[in-house]
Amino acid sequence: MPTTISLSLATVDGPMNVNVVIAVRTPDGRVVGTVPACPLVRSAASSDVTPSLRKLDDKTLAAVVSIIEVKLASEVQIDMLAAGAGISMHHFCRRFKITVGMSPYACVTAIRMVWARWLLVDSSLSTEDIAARVGIGHVGNFRKNFRRHFGINPSLMRASTGQGG
């Protein structure tokens, strides 16, 4: 069973805002989860905002998501994401948070947790193997992040789905 994922941006337009989500997809294209972002209010005055406070444009955000996708199983470095966006690390972190509603680190962790949940439910990989596969080297950190994200231990989630492992 392939255990890799791909990421894509999806938007849902509303009358006064747009919701951006990062969709986590299996190799066959099935969406196994999303990482929601806060609603982004569209405003004619957005061009009046200082450059450091503007959202990342769609092209830049897509480039950053592509970098995250490639590096997700290893170490995702914020300075690498900032370089992909073509701005300083400080401005990147501020603009990413304005655009997505969470820090780059929190976003990467959320994507990893959605990926891990899919692996727990749809594979027989051990918790240790899943932690390594999703880019979290220490299984204790993985369990803590998973519990914080979903409110349940990985082993209890797996047991509730009838999966062994």
Image (spheres, grey):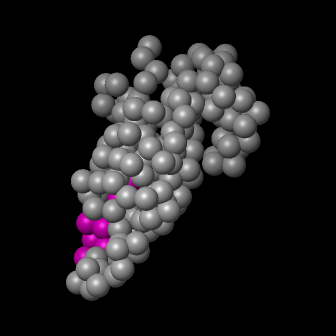
Please provide percent x and percent y for residue 127.
67, 24
Task: Report the residue that reaches farthest toward the front.
Answer: 88
Magenta stretch holds residue 124: no
Q: Is residue 65 among the parts visible in the rendering?
A: yes
Nearer the observer, 88 or 104? 88
Magenta stretch holds residue 20: yes
Task: Report the residue that reaches farthest toward the right.
Answer: 140
The residue drawn where x is 34% and y is 25% is 27
Nearer the observer, 48 or 150? 48
Is 53 left, or right, of 11 in this rendering?
right
The residue drawn where x is 31% and y is 25% is 28
Nearer the observer, 148 or 43? 43
Please provide percent x and percent y for residue 123.
54, 19
Q: Is residue 110 among the parts visible in the rendering?
A: no
Q: Is residue 23 above or below residue 44?
A: above
Q: Which residues are magenta?
A: 12-22
Please provide percent x and percent y for residue 115.
51, 34
Q: Quadrant of the N terminus?
A: top left
Q: Quadrant of the C terminus?
A: top right
Examine the residues drawn in magenta and state their main secondary structure: strand
Q: Quadrant of residue 87?
A: bottom left
Q: Is residue 47 above or below residue 139?
A: below
The residue drawn where x is 30% and y is 49% is 62
The residue drawn where x is 63% and y is 46% is 150
